[in-house]
Image (cartoon, rainbow, N blue to C red):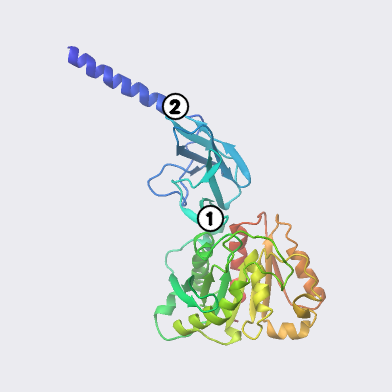
């Protein structure tokens, strides 16, 4: 009897502890689900149908823990289980970087996938769209291309460098040659951004499958803008941040791609585009090398205070000549950015430059803006 009483007491203690442990400092609704960015096997982060994100981290010896996401910080609350919990305000749809701050130091949440952004590895969470976001999701019943990781040697900088290369599904079959798009990310991100955060390979596969875009190769490089911006002369055509990449692109990367992939090597089959500072780089590179590029685009391009009459040696002022050389110029931004992109497009049109402009409704300086811009841009290339 004594032994049975002891075991019963132990079981009762465990039950009571589990009941107490289940009492959390925040309420988590039944509709909360695990987003695609959560590492498999983890119960958090979660997202509910109001687009609020829920975070949990095990830091029993911490005195203060904070979630830093979308420009706002949320104090986490310690539960009776010794773990910390937080819930955000409703977040806008799309991808967001975030950090867990413990004792004033930013850490990556071990329960989330990592992404290179903010000049370092960062945590990220996807607040999903509905069916309207299917254009950047993989689809069944269509052919899928590949994103390859390559290394090449750049004589311009005397170093081995890394790039990502998308090839369309049909590339593996036959001897056909393809046009090439050189696609740049933004400041503080790297060559993996367009394929991880941007899902460009799914956008390409879906556009090609629906015959909205021609099959093409897409090359993504770091562009030497992973490190923090240190200031300096930022006038268009004279920028130094990331300028070390320009000789690499022209003298090393393009020749490597043309030598190792089945490409069409003339200017009519070569394009360049980029988001944010990558858009700035696109202007710097293409407008100085119009013998090598005939298509260009900038998504939320960091192109500020541009005197279109004099910039880049007055190339826009010679609009008739420009329109003959550049087959397509595309500019886009989010409606909430206030980047001046629409004003830039208007000022170019006043000079007679042909330019398409797209505004992503309801989005800021973020990956959803750039996914949408990319989707609008690619169907116009190489036609």
Q: Nearer the viewer, residue 214 or 140?
A: 214
The reply to whether residue 372 is visible in this rendering is yes
Indicate the quadrant where residue 83 lies. Answer: top left
Location of the C terminus (image quadrant): bottom right
Residue at 47% x, 29% y is 79
Location of the N terminus (image quadrant): top left
Q: Residue furthest top?
A: 1
Q: Position of residue 63 (x, y in %)?
A: 51, 31
Q: Position of residue 264 (x, y in %)?
A: 52, 86
Element at badge 1?
strand
Looking at the rendered image, the disc whose residue lies closer to the viewer, 1 or 2, is 1
Q: Position of residue 96 (x, y in %)?
A: 56, 51
Residue at 68% x, 80% y is 288
Indicate the quadrant where residue 249 lies. Answer: bottom right
Disc assigned to residue 80: 2
Q: Residue 59 vs residue 101: left or right?
A: left
Relative to 249, residue 121 above or below: above
Relative to 129, residue 234 above or below: below
Q: Nearer the viewer, residue 224 or 331?
A: 224
Q: Residue 353 vs residue 98: left or right?
A: right
Disc assigned to residue 120: 1
The reply to whether residue 359 is visible in this rendering is no
Task: Give whichever of discs 1 and 2 has the lower sequence position.
Answer: 2
Q: Residue 349 vs residue 157: left or right?
A: right
Q: Residues within 10 Å of mark 2 (few under 14, many from 20)?
A: some
**How many numbered marks are there?**
2
Element at badge 2?
loop
Q: How far apart are the alpha carbons under marks 1 and 2?
A: 33 Å
């Amino acid at each position: 009897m004594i032994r049975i009483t002891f075991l019963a007491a132990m079981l009762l203690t465990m039950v009571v502890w589990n009941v107490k442990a289940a009492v959390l400092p925040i309420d988590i609704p039944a509709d909360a689900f695990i987003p695609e960015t959560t590492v498999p096997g983890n119960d958090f982060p979660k997202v509910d149908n109001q687009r609020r994100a829920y975070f949990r981290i095990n830091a029993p010896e911490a005195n203060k823990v904070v979630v830093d996401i979308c420009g706002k910080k949320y104090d986490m609350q310690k539960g009776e289980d010794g773990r910390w919990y937080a819930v955000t305000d409703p977040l806008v749809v799309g991808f967001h970087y975030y950090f867990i701050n413990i004792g004033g130091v930013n850490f990556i949440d071990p329960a989330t996938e990592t992404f290179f952004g903010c000049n370092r590895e960062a945590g990220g969470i996807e607040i999903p769209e509905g069916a309207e976001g299917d254009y950047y999701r993989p689809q069944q019943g269509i052919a899928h291309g590949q994103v390859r990781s390559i290394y090449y040697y750049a004589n311009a900088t005397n170093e081995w460098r890394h790039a990502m290369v998308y090839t369309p599904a049909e590339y593996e079959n036959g001897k056909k040659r393809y046009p090439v798009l050189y696609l740049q990310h933004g400041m503080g991100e790297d060559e993996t951004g367009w394929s991880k955060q941007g899902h460009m390979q799914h956008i390409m596969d879906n556009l090609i499958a629906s015959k909205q875009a021609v099959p093409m190769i897409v090359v993504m490089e770091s562009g030497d803008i992973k490190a923090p911006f240190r200031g300096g002369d930022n006038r268009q055509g004279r920028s130094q941040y990331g300028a070390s990449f320009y000789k690499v692109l022209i003298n090393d990367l393009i020749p490597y791609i043309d030598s190792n992939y089945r490409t069409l090597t003339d200017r009519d089959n070569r394009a360049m585009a980029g988001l944010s500072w990558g858009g700035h780089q696109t202007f710097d590179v293409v407008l100085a090398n119009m013998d090598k590029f005939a298509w260009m685009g900038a998504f939320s391009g960091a192109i500020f205070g541009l005197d279109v009459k004099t910039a880049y040696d007055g190339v826009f002022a010679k609009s008739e000549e420009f329109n003959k050389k550049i087959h397509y110029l595309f500019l886009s931004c989010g409606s909430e950015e206030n980047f001046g992109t629409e004003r830039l497009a208007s000022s170019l049109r006043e000079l007679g430059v042909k330019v398409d402009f797209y505004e992503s409704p309801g989005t800021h300086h973020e990956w959803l803006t750039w996914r949408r811009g990319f989707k609008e841009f690619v169907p116009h290339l190489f036609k």
